[in-house]
Image (cartoon, rainbow, N blue to C red):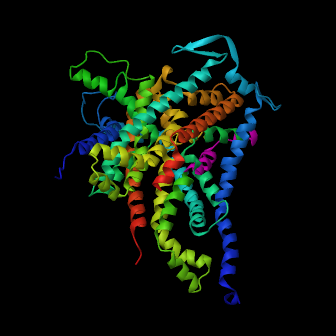
Amino acid sequence: MPDAMPRQTAAGFSGLAAGYALLSPAMLIIVAMLVAPMLALVTLSFWTQNGFELDTSFTLANYWALIEPADEPTMWMGIPFPFKNPVYAILMLKSLVMSLAVTAAVILIAYPMAYFLAFRVTRYKALWIIIITIPFWTSYLLRVFSWKIMLGFNGVINSGLMSLGIISEPLSFLLYNPPAVVITLTHAWVTFAVLPIYVSLEKIDRSLLEAATDLGDSKWQRFRRVTLPLSLPGTISAALLVFIPTVGDYVTPTLVGGPGGTMIGNSIQSLFLKQDNSPRGAALSIVMMAIVALLSLLFMWAVGYRKIRARSA
Amino acid sequence: MRKIFTPLTLYAILFTVFLYGPVLLMPLFSFNDNTFAVFPLKGFTLKHYASMAANGSMLGALWNSLVVATIVAVIATAVGLPTAIALTRYRLRGGGAIAAALMLPLVVPSIIFAVALLVILVRILNVELSLLTVGASHVFICLPFAIMVLMSRLEGFDKSLEEASRDLGEDGWGTFRRVTLPLAWPAVISSLLMCFIISFDEFVMAFFLSGTDPTLPVFLFGQLRFPNKLPGVLALGSLILLVSTILVVAAELLRRRGVQEKPA
């Protein structure tokens, strides 16, 4: 007689079991696709590749190879890198700088658009949001490729300018360099940043803005003292959502970066698929992830993310 | 006081041009009668599309992608639905941590997951790489999107409907089948479409984890190196853009209707 049982207890007990049962497929996927592969990656980073064989004795050699000092430092952009394999440190620094440039550009470009969506669009808001989101869902590969068509030696900008008579021969500095990578990545990620910023702008209580105006703030003061601080949570998450994945990006540098525009992702890809040194590739992946995570936490601490979030919640 | 054309509106229009301009070059040049994507335009042609349709290996890759994306969409949504129900309807210890773990593919660079899966599959388990391994990785990266879409719908409708169903004597499964599922239906379709697009367009995982049978993006990537293959790539790229756009708009409209619609 199930009906005679106190409902609370029945629902409470079977409810908990049912809840975990519902979660079990997802938990299985986490274990199989996240936990186990990550453990394998960490384990492999302590092994070494010996020709075709894997030497499974524990060693830190792969990590050591990334930072092994050399007598003569290698100079890159005027910075000395005192390592025997300076390429990893150089690419890591270069990737971080390029990702930072991309993140800054993305936020600067996305913020006014999000502001427009939140405060100026009254009709057709859903339409605007769909327009902004469509590119995010279309093929990343094709969006990157379209910049290759744009910037190429035989590309749209060069041929366009030439047929207009503005230049007489193609500009060769457009493609295959770090700025081309930064432009392409900015374009590829900018829609990703609009939405979180828009959401935090949309949440702002409009009466706060009225209060600021009533109390004598000019438009600019109102923006700087009310709107901007209250939109920081969305802006900061947008920045992290762009910065973290772009550091490891490898499609864009491959397609538009040329030899000078390679990033750390290219190095990882090459260690795994070309140089057949997956243990060192594993170590490099882990170090990259650790550096990015550390920098992100440092950034959140520096801007006082916790406090900002608590204040605007 | 209300001006229609403010500097900010102008900015929004410029932003949209920046967003769409480069991408729209692809369809433009796919109809242009020239092997290179250069101005001035020479003339209208459909021959790039014809040559694409005659390319057997390209069609093979297209078929692979369609199959993988369909199966991935179904599995990710089928796993996402119970997960979303558990996370919205039950207060479970550790639920937050599981949700956070499931969202990781949104932030961690996919190359990390790609190499980690490559290591465990090839170096540890000795599994042959195939479309199966690509599909498994795609389920993992589609899952956060499926869960987000489904959760926002499940949070959007009145929970008292489910309680009423239970009070009227339906068991858990009956309530799910007769109340929750019909109400969540727009989000289920939306999730299927989104997962399909994500898997269909995904490159990095597929590049690392596919064997001899490429998916369409992997095949395309191989073609990008050869300048003489450009017209075919442009034609195929344009078709992919068109189909993804239609699917995204459909998914987005369904999702919005699903979230806003308040059942009477």
Q: On screen, B150 above or below A293? A: below
Closer-to-camera residue (B58/B187): B187
Q: On screen, A20 above or below B70? A: below
What's the residue at 60%, 30% (across, down)?
Answer: A269
Q: On screen, A169 above or below A30? A: above
Report which quarter residue A144 is drawn in. Answer: top left
Task: Tell whether position B126 is magenta.
Answer: yes
In magenta, the rendered stretch is B121-141
**Horizontal and vertical percent position of residue A204:** 38, 55
Closer-to-camera residue (B57/A4): A4
**Horizontal and vertical percent position of residue A34:** 66, 47
What's the residue at 60%, 50% (across, down)?
Answer: B140
Residue B54 in view (yes/no): no
Closer-to-camera residue (B6/B86): B6
Q: On screen, A151 above or below B93? A: above
Does residue B34 appear to the left or right of A70 in the view shown?
Answer: left
**Horizontal and vertical percent position of residue B112:** 61, 38
The N terminus of chain A - image quarter: bottom right
Does residue A57 appear to the left or right of A86 in the view shown?
Answer: right
What's the residue at 67%, 24% (across, down)?
Answer: A66
